[in-house]
């Protein structure tokens, strides 16, 4: 049984206010025993235009150049995406004394983190590959 529920609110002067107080209280009335409470700032999800920009502009441009340079076997944007993730989203975790590397999936990135990935990818294109990748048009990113 999944008992996880998400509620939103605000903290003012050290006090938590819940927007849906009635729903929150009803939810609590169905629980018994120990619980885990997590408080964090709301996660801002990316828009479809932001995703289209990364997958439709950045990844194809990088893929074409890497292919042209003979560094990958086909100009596949998915290969370029994996390369960019490996370059800029690499994380380390220690398991039983061994350092393990993993790459954060892009769907877990906040808008700010995703924008940083796009900026790093454009800079990589410019400085390392010698290609110009245009910045997104701000009016399209807000849709």
Image (cartoon, helix red, strand yellow):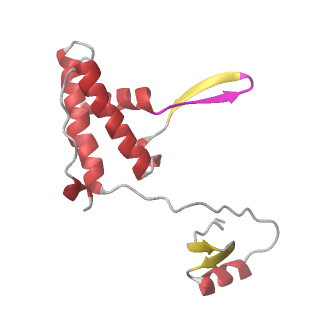
Whether 6 is drawn above or below 85: the answer is below
Whether 88 is drawn above or below 113: the answer is above
- Where is residue 95? Give x, y as percent: 70, 28
Q: Is residue 44 left or right of residue 13?
A: left
**SS assignment for the magenta stretch, majority:** strand
Which span of residues is magenta-colored? Answer: 89-97
Q: Residue at x 40, y 32 (%)?
A: 85
Q: Is residue 109 left or right of residue 128?
A: right
Residue, far top: 70
Residue, far bottom: 22
Picture quarter with the N terminus: bottom right
- Where is residue 29? Give x, y as percent: 73, 82
Residue, far right: 33
Residue, far front: 13
Q: Residue at x 20, y 31 (%)?
A: 61
Whether 118 is drawn above or below 45: the answer is above
Camera-side residue: 68 or 134? 134
Residue 92 occupies quadrant:
top right
- Where is residue 121? Give x, y as percent: 32, 32
Whether 100 is drawn above or below 42: the answer is above
- Where is residue 48? Give x, y as percent: 28, 55
Picture quarter with the C terminus: bottom left
Q: Residue at x 20, y 34 (%)?
A: 133
Q: Is residue 62 left or right of residue 20?
A: left
- Residue 61 inside the magenta-drawn segment: no
């Amino acid at each position: 049984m999944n008992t996880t529920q998400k509620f939103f609110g605000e903290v003012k002067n050290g006090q938590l206010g819940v927007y849906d107080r009635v729903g929150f209280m009803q939810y609590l009335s169905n629980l018994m025993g120990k619980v885990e409470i997590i408080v964090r700032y709301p996660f801002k999800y990316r828009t479809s235009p932001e995703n289209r920009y990364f997958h439709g502009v950045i990844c194809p441009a990088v893929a074409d150049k890497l292919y042209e340079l003979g560094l990958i076997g086909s100009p596949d944007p998915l290969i370029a995406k994996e390369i960019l993730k490996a370059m800029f989203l690499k994380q380390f975790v220690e398991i039983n004394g061994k350092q393990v590397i993993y790459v954060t999936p892009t769907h877990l990135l906040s808008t700010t983190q995703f924008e940083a990935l796009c900026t790093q990818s454009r800079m990589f294109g410019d400085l390392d590959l010698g290609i110009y990748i245009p910045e997104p048009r701000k009016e399209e990113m807000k849709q």
